[in-house]
Amino acid sequence: MARINDNYLKLAAGYLFPEIGRRTGLFREANPDAEIIRLGIGDVVLPLPESVREAMHRAIDEMGTEAGFRGYGPEQGYGFLREAIAAGDFGERGVEVAADEIFVSDGSKCDSGNIQEIFSSEARVAIPDPVYPVYLDTNVMAGRTGPADERGAYEGIVYLPCTAANGFCPQPPSEPVDFVYLCSPNNPTGSVATREALTEWVAYAKANDAVLLFDAAYEAYITEDHVPHSIYEVPGAREVAIEFRSFSKSAGFTGVRCAYTVVPREIEGRAGDGSRIGLQGLWSRRLSTKFNGASYPVQAGAAAVYTETGKAEVRERVEYYMTNAAIIREGLAAAGLRTYGGVNAPYVWLETPRGMGSWDFFDQLLEQAHVVGTPGAGFGSCGEGYFRLSAFGKREQVEEAIERIRANLAT
Ligand code: MLT
């Protein structure tokens, strides 16, 4: 009988969102007439931008001709998209990132989950708590942890508590680690890392020869001018940071799948013999072994995001969701709840009423208000006592959900 990877058995429970889906499914079965509003998983609801659709149609038509047909593409992404990203997301903001430092993929979930493979299985990892579960679970699967304790904390992980006291922003640990996950705008808390905070992280990474894995999947949602859009806005970050970006939440690509990772040529790690090795070559090697690139029509659609029309269409969508975020934030505050986030991020993080456990609050809202959110405890033990509502919903549904929550809390 095939021996399994025992590390999978350490995973505390099912992946968070399927578990929410399971509970919601059970409730729906028992209450088929209930009109459930889902503000749990951050999945977009607005249709794809027209400029994206047109570019994808054109690409498909091209593929239907002798001259325009394309087989396997470059594993790192087509030059036209890498150039458009380098100029549109970085060059125009005065940030140095070259096209050949951009690696196009089929999603940031995969990239932020796969990146740990280029590091040693003995590497020491720092992870914020609460956190997007992918960062933690992939390190558990890779065997970098011992078992979880009764609070769900894995032996061997350096946890970075994010609490109301530190504005839900992780602080550099007092000990050295090999790599650290950071996410700004943050999923799940909606907080953002300031320039000062990122400068501190870059200094920590340099002092400890650590690598920062900076997830900026929600960058498009930044509304305040002082908030950095990229970690490379901080001097020295090119030597220590890898950045993840995604078209999922900005251009509505959750079902289309396209993202990218920036690995600057300066960034290095240490081999077993002590020599310094460029991480860019390792990531590129991994991609060419395990990936055949995102499809041509998808990359053509992603490139359309950088046209003037594409930019305007993305802006419109972001504004729509951010209006939802304001409705959620203000509605819940008016109901007496303490809320965070929702200003530079499409997530509102709220303190559960009367100190309720976050899964208890989940059940209460599902059963009594027929509203699905995400229990904070699902993102880590520091998320206990909190709850996340996603702004990715249709306006009338968001308004209705807030009304129902307010009515529920008033009873
Ligand atoms: C979330 O709800 O946290 C996100 O949608 C998950 C993801 O982007 O994979």
Image: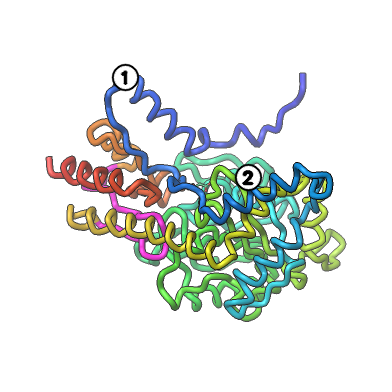
Q: How many marks?
A: 2
Residue 183 falls left or right of residue 238: left
Residue 64 falls left or right of residue 28: right
Q: Amino acid at mark 1?
A: Ala
Residue 300 falls left or right of residue 100: left
Q: Amino acid at mark 2?
A: Thr
**Residue 380, x across and y down, in percent:** 46, 48
**Residue 379, x across and y down, in percent:** 46, 47
Task: Classify 10 Å Cα crowding around label 2: few (below 14), some (14-19), many (20 and above).
Answer: many
Display colour scheme:
rainbow
The extreme left residue here reads 411
Q: Is residue 232 above or below residue 351?
A: below
**Residue 389, x across and y down, in percent:** 35, 48
For image coordinates 58% across by 65% down, the residue present is 307
Q: Which mark is residue 303?
A: none
Q: Earlier in the sequence, mark 2 or mark 1?
A: 1
Q: Is residue 386 above or below residue 339?
A: above
Q: In this rendering, which labeled residue sits more in front, label 2 or label 1?
A: 1
Quadrant occupied by the C terminus: top left
Quadrant in which residue 283 is drawn: bottom right
At mark 2, the secondary structure is helix
Check disc 2 and report the residue beneath it: 138
At mark 1, the secondary structure is helix
Q: Does the magenta run of residues contain 343?
A: yes
- For the residues marked 2 and 1, what is the alpha-carbon distance in whole angstroms? 34 Å
Quadrant in which residue 11 is drawn: top right
Q: Is residue 1 above or below residue 200?
A: above
Q: Which mark is residue 30?
A: 1
Which residues fall within the magenta stretch?
A: 338-356
Q: Does the magenta run of residues contain 222?
A: no
| Callout 2–callout 1 Cβ contact below 8 Å | no
**Residue 281, x across and y down, in percent:** 82, 61
